[in-house]
Amino acid sequence: MDIRKKMATLAVHGSGHQSVMGAVGFPIFQSANFLYAGETNYHELRYIRLNNTPNHEMLHETLKELEKGDAALVTGSGMAAITTALLTALRAGDHLLAQPVLYGGTHTFIAHDLERHGVRHGFIDPDDPDKWEAALTPATRAVYVESVANPLLDVLDLDRVVAFAKHHGIMTIIDNTLPYPVNYNPLSHGFDVVVHSCTKYLNGHSDIVAGAIVGARAFVDKCKETLDHLGGSLDPHACFLLARGIKTLPLRMEAHNRNAQQVAELLATHPAVRMVRYPGLPTDPAHDRAKRWFRGFGGIVTFELRGGAEEADRFTKSLTIPLFAPSLGGVESLVTLPALTCHAGMPSEERRRIGISDFLIRMSVGIEDPEDLVSDLSRALDGFVCVK
């Protein structure tokens, strides 16, 4: 069966349509608590903070089907999913390996916050897998990567990551936010745990923050217990909006993939552009790997203009369709400078060392008409005065 059609059906119906009193749309159960039904385990009490209202449970079924996992857990934000998974997998004295270019919040949590919990870390060189073994310690318990790195769009040798971890008996955790389940299913390729910022493509409408953890039931159950104590639950109304957004995920992804490809091709040939990263470009360093594993190349394009931060700021302000705002994955096109938004929490020297300049532009390409997007970008680029 064609995988896109299968995914489209799962997005609409999950594991099967769940009707309540004949309603076609799943209702919002906006109740903080539910009648006691003889539960003997604290984590099974029906209560919003315990992440088990009917809205939570319906989402859990849908998300596990989309990511081909045994179980899923929805969380109050993408960072709640990431931190919950890491705090569940690691204990004081453990060691974590990670790739150096990650979403800014994740990088800061790994490099600074985990240390306060007694967890040390090390970074692996994405371009030199032969050196990964040297980064191991006897206390290494997990390796954390992104399927497509935010914001530079690097793609590691993902099969090599899985083989390396299995050989050394350590857990693999992967953030699959940018490819989303339509383009890539990490669990099917041997990864142990998938995390998502559902704020992005899974919801797709820039109106909630949410996250998810998907994997083996035993680990997800442990994550639920951690999350129950941390309190990072998702409100039932936000659950409803996320479930509604997921229904159109495959349709939106077709537009994101198509539009971003056209935007990247324009940028790659324009003289005002110094550098462009998009895995769908045959010249991109990540192209061969992305083509091997992904069913689409995603909706994010990252680039630099000839000039500096002042020119980047002037360019973004001259656009009429993309909005200057943080985050990504919504139906509308957004541009941002990661140094000012998603990676602002990192020291500038650290950002520059991993390749994030003060004038790097990240564009989340929306589902607008591609001709309108290309026309707007062309106009802004043609009017751009290069400063050498």
Image (cartoon, rainbow, N blue to C red):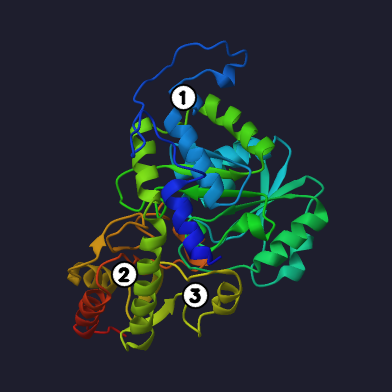
- Which mark, by number, is residue 49? 1
Q: At 66% across and 38% down in the image, what residue appears? A: 217
Tell me if mark 1 has few (under 14), some (14-19) or many (20+) residues whose alpha carbon lies within 10 angstroms of its own: many
Alpha carbon separation for disc pair 3 and 2: 24 Å
Question: Which of the two discs, 3 and 1, labels the residue nearer the N terminus?
Answer: 1
Dot 3: element = loop
| Pointer 3 residue | 279
Disc 1 secondary structure class: helix
Give the class, few, some or many, for how many residues have Cα within 10 Å of label 2's Cα (few <14, many ≥20): some
Place residue 367 in its image quadrant. bottom left
Residue 125 placement: quadrant: bottom right
Q: State the CA–CA distance, disc 3 to disc 1.
A: 39 Å
- Identify the amino acid type marked 2: Ala
- Report the residue marked by disc 2: 309
Give coordinates of residue 248: x percent, y percent: 36, 55
Q: Is residue 362 visible?
A: no
Position above or below: 284 against 219: below
Mark 3 or 2, which is nearer the eye? 3
